Amino acid sequence: LTQWFDAPEQEALRQELVRVGVLDAVESQDATDDVLLLDDLIAEFEKHLTFEKERTPAYVVAQVNILNRVFGDCGFHAWGDIVPDKLKGWLLTQRNGERGCSKRTYCQYVQTLRQFGKYVVDELELADVNPMRKLKRLPHVKTDQPPPVPAGVPRACGWGDRKSTRLN
């Protein structure tokens, strides 16, 4: 019976049973062999950052921790599990939650996720589409510098208004 059901002629029947919920979408062993587990992909990404990109150990650990935290909190175990809307929801929860994260942390999460997705698609060539490609960073605001002075308005300290003069 299993051989009959796994025959290519029965594909339409299998798809109908999946559609009505009688069967799971991934039933056969062959299909599970092609699953890209996130733990394996993250390990490859870690090697890539360490050896090819020559990043510092602290940077590599930070990136891996971000990926493990995000994917773990979202319940993603395989590449195919990644749902962009669920990622966006998680990011917004982190930003607007009880102890909301800073813009810098939020942008770091987004950058790490996008970099990881680009690596899997472009470098490993194991997937066709990066589900994280449309995640957006928050607008960048420099907090350590004063806002720019509009043209024509003299600066309070006079810097940049006249040529530097040297006192002897």
Image (spheres, rainbow, N blue to C red):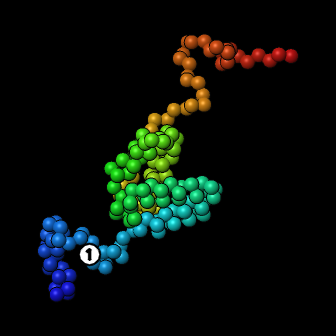
Residue 117 visible, this orientation = no
Give x and y (percent) for residue 120: 44, 61
Image position of 39 with respect to 59: above or below: below
State the residue in front, 87 or 151: 87
Q: Residue drawn at (67%, 14%), measured in percent from left and top?
A: 158
Give residue 8's quadrant in the image. Answer: bottom left
Left or right: 93 in relation to 3:
right
Residue named by callout 1: 27
Of the pair 21 and 137, the residue shown nearer to us: 21
Q: Residue furthest right?
A: 168
Residue at image position (38%, 60%) is 75
Q: Residue 87, position in %: x, y?
A: 38, 51
Pick the quarter of the image with the C terminus: top right
**Mark 1 belongs to which amino acid?**
Glu
Residue at screen point 44% across, 45% down: 94
Tell which of 20 and 99 is nearer to you: 99
Q: What is the residue that sits farthest to the front in this orientation? A: 98
Specify whether residue 112 is in view.
yes
